[in-house]
Image: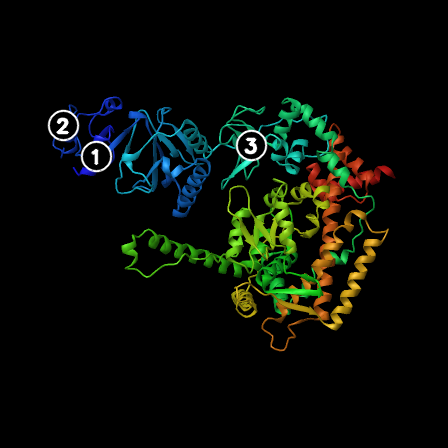
């Protein structure tokens, strides 16, 4: 036995011998309170096998030794990182976990001993008079094994003398204070997965009579938990999935946390008016704080303050009738080059894809491709960038995602290739980083790779900013369902997601410095957004608040009338698909390699394009026409708020269409926006204005239909329809059939019967 190992015995550790599988090969429970005598320990340590137990099983040979925890107040936090699927996840967890401990325990690295284990884990060792039995501190969702647990009384740890990663070693393990141990315990428990099921609240039919959006759902969508508890708690930490909060005046390092995805609060502390180990939504926290958990009283109070569907619908109802020019509801496909028009039309004919959805997706893709490479100067001091936000509105099963995919698949292919390359290069980098210094000298140096991914799906603001720092041209957000993105706008209003997104739409620099996170800075954010959403879900976000802050007016909406088509045998030519893919990739690469200019510090200097003489005349006309509508007493006041944003969007549209037409053409005046481009941009703006009006009318109609149906719940289906029909003979028959749960044919039958009865 070497002297280093022997020293552990003399340092008053209680040692046991173990076999290859890290299991003790001799009984060891007695060593919790009594160390082995030196001679007996050496016999166990030098044992090579060949002896059998009474049950005739062989005692395995000794291959190493372990340290009994609990003895002499020794305790270990065992971090088992093999529960993570990738090395990056393991490293991120370890860095975050130890980083927080260092932030909260003074001289943490001088107080504990840390060893790396054989199977992707760590041991944090110390002594404490508060040592307990083995405790499972945290497990991840979907796992039975703990990621964090203690080894205390009744436990032991395998030793790794060569794997020290701390300043101190096994021989220098010392006592830590009770406060420091409490920080380790309580912080570790924060990683424990809690099933995030909110309290189910019984609905009072006397209060909620007009739609499915309850008072509490509306309150939860429009408020975050911190707006309720912010006068009692402070955010003291920022984990990957949780905000760490601490009660004012608390002596413990934290009191609980708030889940980032759901916004629920969970407390460990018993020192506040909120129950510990209970999930709280914004509504249940409000009910606890102001109504002593009386949910009915809380709902009634909030209903009187404007929460709940009936009040929301009434508040949003325009005073004037909204008028739409029906010709503007057709997507102006002629804004694109003729070969692209042909491709979109062929997709529509063979794959039953929506021309509207495809056209909007192409605009998003052009925006993403141009990125920060170009800007349009409307006049001195007024420049617009290429950013657009597009919401594809349609009911489930109508084919939103397939239509989008038909258009963006070429750059998705490039993006997926970049992700795969990064993973491959990062594996090489990790391999090189884990080599010893001597081994690294024998290999070519491997630098840490840069992420070149430029499309993000489900991603946090922090991760999005980090990605944009590495991809300063642009990062596009594409989500099949935008509902989660919309909901995030209501969270944590101080430094909120809403403020971040409003800044990026305008191209203002973003400096992200949340809680304990190191700051991230993007000087020129360019983040176009595209995704689908169902109309009923979208309407729940179409609130006065989101109109007042300008968020909804920045959204470009596409909500065409679509029918589900029967199967057709028409096939798309594979050469057409390949031509389209090659064309889009060529455009993307042309911008990337021909248009990007950088200054001496490596920062992008956007190419500036301006209106040509004829285009400027048209722009002044368009601008003044919009201004006249804004000043008109005839235009609906509710819809006027979107017009100023169209004054920004029209130059942006002109920039996108101008650039998409210009790339690859040798005789094109690249630096001047043509009259043709500005007129196409005007068409596009009229389309999106008409669609916004259509969405608004739809939300009003649905609300009115639901109100009548629910207000007459005891009447027959035909009687309900009669009331609806008498109220509005031009009602949306398809929507009524859906809300009443009958066929459209039955609706026409009702109309015929009612007309006959009136004769």
Closer to the N terminus: mark 2 or mark 3?
A: 2
10 Å crowding of disc 3: few (<14), some (14-19), many (20+)? many
Dividing the picture into quadrants, the one containing residue 514 is top right
Q: Residues within 10 Å of mark 2 (few under 14, many from 20)?
A: few
* Residue nearest the observer in this picture, 216 or 499: 499
Residue 707: x and y, percent? 75, 35
Image location of residue 290, percent across then percent down: 66, 25
Marker disc for residue 265: 3
Q: Quadrant of residue 135?
A: top left
291 relative to 24 in the view: left or right:
right
Work out how far the residue at label 2 is from the one at label 3, CA to CA, in angstroms.
56 Å
- The local secondary structure at tag 3 comes to strand
Q: Earlier in the sequence, mark 1 or mark 3?
A: 1
Residue occupied by mark 1: 7
State which tag comes first along the sequence, 2 or 1.
1
Q: The residue tagged with tag 2: helix, strand or loop? A: helix
Residue under the point 30% across and 52% down: 435
Q: Is residue 754 left or right of residue 405?
A: right
Residue at which label 2 appears: 39
Q: Residue at x 42, y 34 (%)?
A: 139
């Amino acid at each position: 036995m070497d002297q280093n190992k022997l020293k552990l015995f003399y340092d008053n550790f209680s040692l046991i011998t173990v076999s290859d599988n890290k299991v003790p090969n001799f009984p060891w429970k007695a060593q919790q309170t009594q160390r082995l005598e030196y001679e007996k320990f050496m016999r166990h340590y030098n044992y090579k096998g060949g002896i059998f137990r009474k049950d005739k099983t062989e005692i395995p040979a000794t291959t190493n030794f372990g340290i009994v925890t609990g003895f002499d107040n020794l305790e270990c936090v065992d971090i088992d990182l093999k529960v993570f699927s990738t090395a990056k996840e393991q490293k991120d967890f370890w860095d975050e976990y130890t980083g927080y401990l260092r932030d909260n325990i003074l001289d943490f690295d001088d107080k504990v001993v840390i060893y790396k284990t054989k199977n992707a884990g760590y041991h944090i060792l110390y002594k404490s008079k508060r040592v307990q039995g083995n405790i499972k501190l945290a497990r991840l969702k979907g796992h039975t094994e703990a990621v964090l647990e203690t080894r205390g009384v009744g436990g032991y740890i395998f030793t790794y003398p060569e794997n020290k990663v701390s300043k101190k070693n096994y021989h220098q393990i010392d006592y830590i204070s009770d406060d420091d141990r409490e920080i380790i315990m309580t912080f570790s428990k924060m990683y424990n997965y809690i099933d995030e099921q909110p309290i189910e609240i019984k609905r009072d039919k006397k209060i909620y009579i007009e739609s499915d959006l309850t008072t509490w759902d509306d309150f939860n969508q429009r408020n975050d938990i911190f707006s309720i508890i912010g006068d009692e708690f402070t955010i003291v930490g920022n984990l990957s999935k949780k905000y760490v909060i601490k009660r004012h005046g608390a002596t413990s390092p934290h009191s609980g946390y708030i889940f980032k995805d759901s916004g629920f609060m969970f407390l460990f502390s018993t020192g506040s008016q909120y129950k510990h180990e209970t999930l709280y939504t914004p509504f249940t926290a409000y009910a606890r704080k102001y109504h002593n958990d009386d949910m009915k009283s809380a709902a009634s109070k909030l209903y009187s303050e404007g929460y709940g569907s009936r009040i929301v619908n009434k508040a949003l109802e325009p005073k004037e009738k909204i008028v739409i020019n029906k010709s503007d509801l057709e997507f102006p496909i002629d804004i694109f080059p003729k070969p692209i028009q042909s491709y979109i039309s062929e997709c529509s004919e063979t794959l039953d894809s929506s021309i509207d959805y495809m056209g909007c997706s192409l605009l998003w893709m052009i925006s993403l491709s141009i990125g920060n490479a170009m800007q349009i100067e409307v006049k001195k001091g007024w420049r617009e960038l290429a950013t657009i936000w597009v919401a594809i509105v349609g009911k489930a099963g109508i084919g939103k995602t397939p239509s989008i995919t038909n258009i963006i698949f070429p750059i998705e292919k490039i993006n997926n290739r970049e992700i795969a390359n990064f993973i491959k290069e990062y594996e090489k980098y990790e391999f090189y980083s884990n080599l010893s210094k001597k081994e690294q000298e024998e290999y070519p140096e491997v630098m840490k790779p840069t992420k070149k991914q430029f499309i993000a799906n489900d991603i946090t603001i922090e991760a999005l900013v980090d990605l944009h720092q590495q991809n300063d041209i642009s990062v596009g957000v594409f989500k099949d369902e935008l509902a989660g993105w919309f909901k995030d706008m209501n969270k944590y209003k101080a430094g909120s997601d809403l403020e971040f997104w409003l800044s990026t739409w305008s191209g203002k620099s973003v400096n992200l410095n949340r809680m304990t996170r190191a700051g991230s800075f993007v000087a020129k954010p360019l983040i176009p957004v595209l995704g689908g959403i169902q109309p009923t879900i979208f309407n729940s976000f179409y609130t006065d608040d989101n109109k007042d802050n300008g968020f909804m007016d920045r959204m470009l909406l596409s909500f065409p009338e679509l029918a589900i088509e029967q199967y057709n045998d028409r096939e798309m030519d594979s050469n057409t698909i390949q031509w389209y893919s090659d064309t889009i990739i060529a455009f993307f690469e042309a911008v990337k390699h021909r248009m990007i200019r950088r200054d001496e510090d490596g920062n992008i200097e956007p190419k500036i394009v301006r209106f040509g003489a004829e285009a400027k005349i048209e722009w002044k006309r368009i601008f003044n026409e919009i201004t006249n509508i804004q000043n008109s007493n005839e235009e609906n006041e509710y819809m006027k708020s979107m017009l100023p944003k169209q004054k920004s969007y029209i130059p942006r549209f002109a920039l996108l269409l101008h650039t998409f037409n210009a790339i690859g053409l040798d005789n094109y005046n690249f630096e001047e926006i043509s009259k043709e481009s500005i007129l196409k941009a005007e068409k596009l703006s009229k389309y999106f204005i008409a669609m916004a009006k259509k969405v608004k009318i739809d939300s009003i109609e649905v609300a009115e239909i639901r109100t009548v149906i629910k207000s007459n719940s005891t009447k027959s289906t035909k009687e309900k329809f009669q009331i609806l029909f008498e109220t509005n003979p031009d009602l949306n028959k398809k929507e009524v059939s859906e809300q009443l749960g009958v066929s459209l044919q039955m609706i026409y039958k009702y109309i015929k019967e009612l007309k006959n009865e009136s004769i």
